[in-house]
């Protein structure tokens, strides 16, 4: 993606609305007979789809959501269960009068998409799942290891250099398309 295209995509995503019924912030771009609803993963937001919106919005109606308590969506004391997120998205789709949609989900967003697709087959016509969470299984050692490393003290005391290294190892080429993710995470940690 050229720098101008990337900047155009970012500008599109900066423009958003908030659904008054659900408090979900979303960016909408494009037209077409098929609507694509993009659901981000844990610790992310609608900006995760910045590299997709320009090309796909030329053929489809694209709606990129911030799940409740993420990004620009309203904040609250929610359960943060898959059931909660599914219900929020069902309400969101009803509010926008969406039907027969394709859900594109990444990680936790894919897990939510599966729940939506199974429980609301009249709403969802297709699922596109990118590295869906919740499918893998862990042995007792792995479960214990996750419990030990996912504590606030470790997360808040990780240096910015370590965070940068952790991000970089997840990409074959860590370019401008991924750097904004790191910048967002560092800004979140600083605030």
Image (spheres, grey):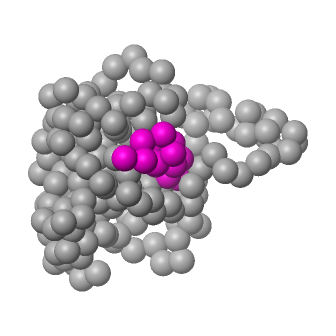
Residue 146 at x, y percent in the picture: 73, 39
The image quarter containing residue 103 is: bottom left
Figure check: 170 above or below 109? below
Residue 119 part of the magenta-drawn span: yes
Q: Going by the picture, which residue comes out furthest to the bottom?
A: 2
Residue 83 at x, y percent in the picture: 49, 30
Residue at left 24%, top 82%? 2
The image quarter containing residue 94 is: top left
Dominant secondary structure of the residues highlighted in magenta in the image: helix
Residue at left 19%, top 35%? 95
Residue at left 41%, top 60%? 126
Residue at left 39%, top 17%? 77
Residue 118 part of the magenta-drawn span: yes
Location of the N terminus by quadrant is bottom left
Taking depth in this image into account, of 158 and 85 the one nearest to the observer is 85
Location of the C terminus by quadrant is top left
Q: Is residue 182 left or right of 93 when viewed as pictured?
A: right
Residue 186 appearing in the image: no
Q: Going by the picture, which residue comes out furthest to the top?
A: 77
Taking depth in this image into account, of 30 and 32 the one nearest to the observer is 32
Residue 117 at x, y percent in the picture: 46, 48
Residue 84 appearing in the image: yes
The image quarter containing residue 128 is: bottom left
Q: Going by the picture, which residue comes out furthest to the front?
A: 122
Taking depth in this image into account, of 1 and 64 the one nearest to the observer is 64
Residue 30 at x, y percent in the picture: 14, 65
How many numbered dots are placed on residues in this image? 0
Magenta residues (range)? 107-122
């Amino acid at each position: 993606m050229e720098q101008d295209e990337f900047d155009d995509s970012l500008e599109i995503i900066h423009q958003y609305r908030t659904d008054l019924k659900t408090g979900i912030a979303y960016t909408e771009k494009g037209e077409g007979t098929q609507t694509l609803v993009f659901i981000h993963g844990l610790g992310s937001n609608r900006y995760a789809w910045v590299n997709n919106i320009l090309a796909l919005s030329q053929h489809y109606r694209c709606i990129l959501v911030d799940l409740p308590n993420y990004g620009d969506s309203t904040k609250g004391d929610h359960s943060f269960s898959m059931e909660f997120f599914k219900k929020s998205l069902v309400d969101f789709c009803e509010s926008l009068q969406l039907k027969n949609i394709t859900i594109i989900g990444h990680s936790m967003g894919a897990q939510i998409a599966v729940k939506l697709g199974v429980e609301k087959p009249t709403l969802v016509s297709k699922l596109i799942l990118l590295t869906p969470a919740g499918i893998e299984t862990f042995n007792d050692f792995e479960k214990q290891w996750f419990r030990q490393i996912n504590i606030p003290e470790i997360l808040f005391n990780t240096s910015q250099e370590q965070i940068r290294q952790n991000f970089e190892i997840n990409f074959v080429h860590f370019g401008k398309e991924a750097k904004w993710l790191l910048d967002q995470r560092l800004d979140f940690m600083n605030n």
